[in-house]
Amino acid sequence: MFTISTPNDGLIAFEERDIIPFDVTISGSNFYEATISTAHIKYQQLDQENYSIRHSCYDIKDNLTLHINLNEPWLGFRLIRKKGIRHFSGNKEIKMLQGQLNFAYCTNLDNSIELLKGNEYDVLDLYISPEMFYKIATGDKLLKDFMERVKLGKNVALSEEPFWGNIKVLDTIDYLMRNPNNKMAVEETLRQIAEAAAAPKPAMQYITEQHIENLFLVRDEIRNNLTVHTEIEELARKAQMNVTYFKQMFYGIFELSPYQYLLYERMKMAKELLRNDPSLSFTNVAALVGFSSYDNFQRAFSKKEGKSLTDWRNANDLAAFILSWEMLSA
């Protein structure tokens, strides 16, 4: 069991609640909350037989150092969903930015995090049992190599440095948060993370935390307004960057250009509509996801999916589409 303490307040006592509002409520979770002079902390936690999901939010009133301890081995990943956080483990400092992941094994989790006044932080942790991890790892070279290092019983990380999750990873984790009892979703999330960790990364210039936050806000705006094609100059303005820098940084974090991302989200929604409402005509689907005509929609869909709209809708394995990784193929 995790314990959290501060230099001034000592061990923080959390109270269990019936429910606490989060942007994503993890079904089946237990909810906990604590208020101290410098922070309001809440988290939801789901414990399953072979894995646990913990989603924590910190509303910081004054600069604060939290000490986190777990007197047993820990294996899993951390995703920073909002704001960058500095971690300290012994003499080692690890800074994780919004959208970055760290997958690691610790023989004894004992670290501190620095949180700054006026910020709201959002962190997702997934713990997985060694037994479940070993089963998943056998099919992936990077995970298998990592597993062998875990067996040595020493602290080890999947990647030397925290890495960007890319759109596919972020969406798979988002699916997992909404379907936390789906064991296959856990397994696929780990595979997607391993693929992202192993893949060559786009060159990244220096980027501020504010710019990262702006990029995520622009990402959300694109996702929430699929019928609108906003010019790249306007998106860059909203991100407070020039166009060249905006395109480089957007691709560096999400591994899709802004236009590719718009198309990606349109195709995701189109497949949802085709699956959920077979009575919808292709022309109606085209309009609902922002295409100016059926012909444009059909060409874009066929190019991306390798089959026509009719063939895709009539596929015998359509039920498999309920799985996120079927939805997420880019």
Image: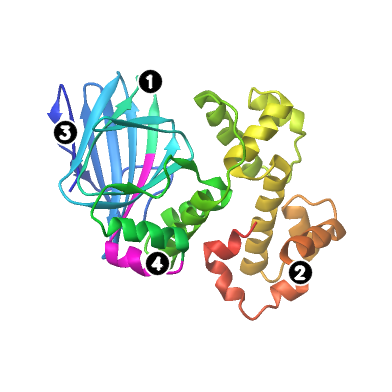
Amino acid type, mark 1: Gly
Mark 4, mark 2: which one is toward the viewer? 4
- Give the CA distance from mark 4 to mark 2: 34 Å
Amino acid type, mark 2: Leu
Q: How many other residues sit within 10 Å of disc 1, few (<14), some (14-19) or many (≥20)?
A: few
Mark 1, mark 4: which one is toward the viewer? 4
| Number of the label disc, if any, that sits on residue 309 | 2
| Number of the label disc, if any, that sits on residue 12 | 3
Of callouts 4 and 3, the N-terminal one: 3
Above or below for 176 versus 237: below
- The answer to whether 292 appears left or right of 198 in the picture is right
- Which stretch appears magenta? 123-139
| Magenta region includes residue 135 | yes
- Residue under the point 31% across and 43% down: 20
- Give the CA distance from mark 4 to mark 3: 36 Å
- Residue under the point 21% across and 52% down: 73
Where disc 2 sits, the SS reads helix
Amino acid type, mark 3: Ile
- Give the CA distance from mark 1 to mark 3: 20 Å
